[in-house]
Image: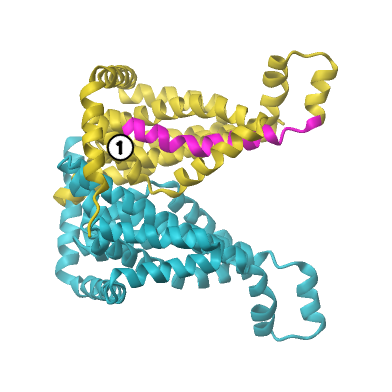
Chain colours: A cyan, B yellow
Amino acid sequence: MEELVSAFDAQVDNALFWLADHASFVFDFCRLVLEGLYAGVLGLLMLPPFYVIAALAGLLAWRVLGLVPGVVTAAALALCAAMMLWPETMSTLALVIAATVIALATGLPLGVLAGLLPRLEKLLTPALDLVQTLPPYIYLLPSIALLGYGPATALIATVIVAMPPAIRLTALGIRQTPREFIELGHATGVTPLQMFLKIRLPFAVPSIMAGVNQSLMMAFGMVVIAGIVGSGGLGETIYGAIRTLDIATSINASIAIVVLTMVLDRVTQAAARTK
Amino acid sequence: MSFNPGAFLAPAVDWLNASFHPFFALITQVIEAVLSAIEAAFLALPPAGLVAAVVVLAAMAAGLRVAVLAGCCLGFCWLTGLWQASMQTIALVLVAVLIAVAIAFPLGIIAARRPGVEAALRPILDVMQTVPPWVYLIPAVMIFSLGRVPAIIATIVYGIPPMLRLTTLAFRTVPNDLKELGQAIGAKPRAILWKIEFPAARPTLLVGLNQCILLTLAMVVLAGLVGAGGLGAEVTRGLTRMEMGLGLRAGLAIVAVAVLLDRLSRGALDRQRKGA
């Protein structure tokens, strides 16, 4: 038993060394792209002062939710800034946005294909089931082994967690086009492209938006956990505060996390409903 | 301008810790005792004996295929050399699920009977299910410090919402004619609840239990970060010390435990469907 286990550990280390020697350019490239995307989003978010972002978010919430939620949103984001956690809050938001963009860019086309091809969906379903059954925490392991400490690792793990709901709900939406409308399309002789864009897609929009909301929330949960691999942002602040039992900082950071989650969730849910 | 709510709240937490220390210490002792007893029971049998016992029980409760899968999963945990950590994780999950169900099940029945209670609970549940799991650990750590006790308390709180929601749904969707049939033959309310409503609600309740178990496992693993022990602690060690072999073994053992718990609880559900 003991020899088996230590032999396994040694093999894993060897394999990782081999990868680091022979394939590091692949992982360096991945890290460069991911960190570039993250830095770009963060740069955009940090460009204006905090009250501009808070006012913009407030306006958005006002448009989709109403006046009171709009004011509350702006005030809540201003509170994050008042707690001196603005840079951390924005870097968490940048991670969430970058990860969700990657997850949607891969998840939505896959979901559309799975909705159109039942065979592909049959192939994907067990994989998605497994990804959603496992605790999200363990997705940090392969990414830290290959990419090392930093935001790129956090992004990869977050993308893995955020993709399944987008794929699932997109496929569901595409598959659920009412029969009469498909027949109507055939009867009026539309091309396949028109059929997809004008008939299937509009019916799928509510389900796809629900998928976007779920992806965003999964991404948020993971980004906060990824503080342990040095993602930066509120997750890392909390991780540090808990390890040093710094109660005041961990309360502040949790308030900021709850504020950001509730704002993102409510605004995207309302946006999905109004569509 | 700066505003620091943590600086106001931290003294309140300190005051709580100082003045209610005996109470929290009592909770800690009770939880530690229960956990240690369950762990000791798991570890008393040799691994092979426990695997055999689980396989036999699974074959009786959920069928042969599930039993073989359960045996493979547990055997794999043993092969990774993390048997003790796996048992600690399973013990934590079991205790947390039991307590979460004991709280959520009665509350769910009450919420299904009284729309007022449900309307009061819904916004709380909405917020609880939106907030990321990490945030649950923080208040628990503030009061119970590091270790298994804050982990299990955060896990219980995290496991309640899905079970509560699905219990309410399950009892709300029991067909009215069944309940009226019970009243017509003069059954007592208790008999109606256990003999009519409970069997009709069982499939949805089992879905809730499955959800509760999987969320609980996710939280128990995450709680390795605050010193909960078990497989989560091994993953954390792998991540922070870059011991990738250990991390990989712990990760795979978690996969095995997740598949085991998922299939066992789902196997019970499938059997119920076939029987009905």
* Residue A93, image x, y percentages: 34, 64
Q: Is residue A224 magenta?
A: no
Left or right of B240, for residue B161: right
Residue A247 versus residue A160 in the image, above or below? above
Left or right of A11, for residue A175: right
* Residue A34, image x, y percentages: 28, 72
Start and end of the magenta stretch? B151-176
* Residue B41, image x, y percentages: 33, 17
The three-letter amino acid code for the residue at tag 1 is Pro
Pointer 1: what residue?
B139
Q: Is residue B159 magenta?
A: yes
Circle 1 SS class: helix
Left or right of B124, for residue B144: left
Quadrant of the image for the N terminus of chain A?
A: top left
* Residue shown at the point (40%, 29%) measured from the top left: B96
Residue B93 versus residue A56 in the image, above or below? above
* Residue shown at the point (39%, 31%) measured from the top left: B93
Taking the view exactly as shown, the residue that stands out farthest to the right is: B184
Determine the main secondary structure of the stretch shown in magenta: helix
Does the image show residue B89? no
Q: Nearer the viewer, residue B159 or A105?
A: B159
Quadrant of the image for the C terminus of chain A?
A: bottom right
Q: Nearer the viewer, residue A186 or B168?
A: B168
* Residue B97, image x, y percentages: 44, 29
Give the image quarter of residue B48: top left
* Residue shown at the point (22%, 58%) measured from the top left: A145
Residue B14 versus residue A125 in the image, above or below? above
* Residue shown at the point (50%, 58%) measured from the top left: A266
